[in-house]
Amino acid sequence: MERTLIIVKPDAVQRGLTGTIISRFEARGLRIVGMKFMQVSRALAEKHYAEHVGKPFFEGLVKYITSSPVVVIALEGKNAVEAARKTIGSTKPHEAAAGTIRGDFALEVGRNLVHGSDGVESGQREVANFFTDAELISWPRNTDPWIFE
């Protein structure tokens, strides 16, 4: 089972879309193994966006993700990273397909509502940045045999 990190970003929280976004992942069949409402510190934001240090948009990313509370979610499932990214849609909302989170609710790349890990390794790293092992609970659902072969 893969794990991926989802961040319901400040714009989604401010717009009251948190529950709608979470329900999309649950309906897809992904299992929540960790979730918390939090204010991201500057240090954590810089760690999360470390690959973008030195790029012209880095400071804007940090300022934005620390501007308001977020909901961070660790999801688990077979092909969780790819399933989550397809549920989220293209980074550029105007290119995102209808039926995806961004395709249905976002208009601008700088306000694209949700972050999802872009690979299995980044998913592991990002989950570890936001959750301790004690905060993650792998658990079987009675519906798992109806979701996973």
Image (spheres, rainbow, N blue to C red):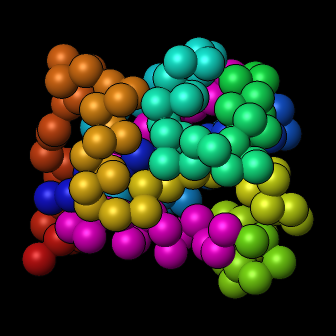
**In the rendered view, would you say 127 is above or below 39?**
below
Q: Which residue in the rendered view is the most extreme toward the front? A: 54
Image quarter where the N terminus lies is bottom left
Image quarter where the C terminus lies is bottom left
Q: Is residue 89 on the magenta stretch?
A: yes
Q: Is residue 83 on the magenta stretch?
A: yes
User: Which quarter of the figure has residue 46?
Assistant: top right
User: Which quarter of the figure has residue 104?
Assistant: bottom right
In the rendered structure, the answer to whether residue 40 lies left or right of residue 76 reads: right
Asked whether residue 127 is in view, the answer is yes
In the rendered structure, the answer to whether residue 7 lies left or right of residue 61 reads: left
**In the rendered view, would you say 35 is above or below 74?**
above
Which region shows up in magenta? 69-91
The residue under the point 49% across, 68% down is 85
Asked whether residue 105 is in view, the answer is no
Q: Nearer the viewer, residue 14 or 146?
A: 14
**In the rendered view, would you say 45 is above or below 52?**
above
Q: Nearer the viewer, residue 65 or 72?
A: 65
Q: Position of residue 114 (x, y in %)?
A: 63, 51
Q: Position of residue 25 (x, y in %)?
A: 47, 57
Q: Nearer the viewer, residue 55 or 43?
A: 55
Q: Which residue in the rendered view is the most extreme toward the right? A: 107
In the rendered structure, the answer to whether residue 33 lies left or right of residue 106 reads: left
**In the rendered view, would you say 134 is above or below 27?**
above
Q: Position of residue 14 (x, y in %)?
A: 82, 32
The residue under the point 41% across, 46% down is 5
The residue under the point 78% across, 24% down is 67
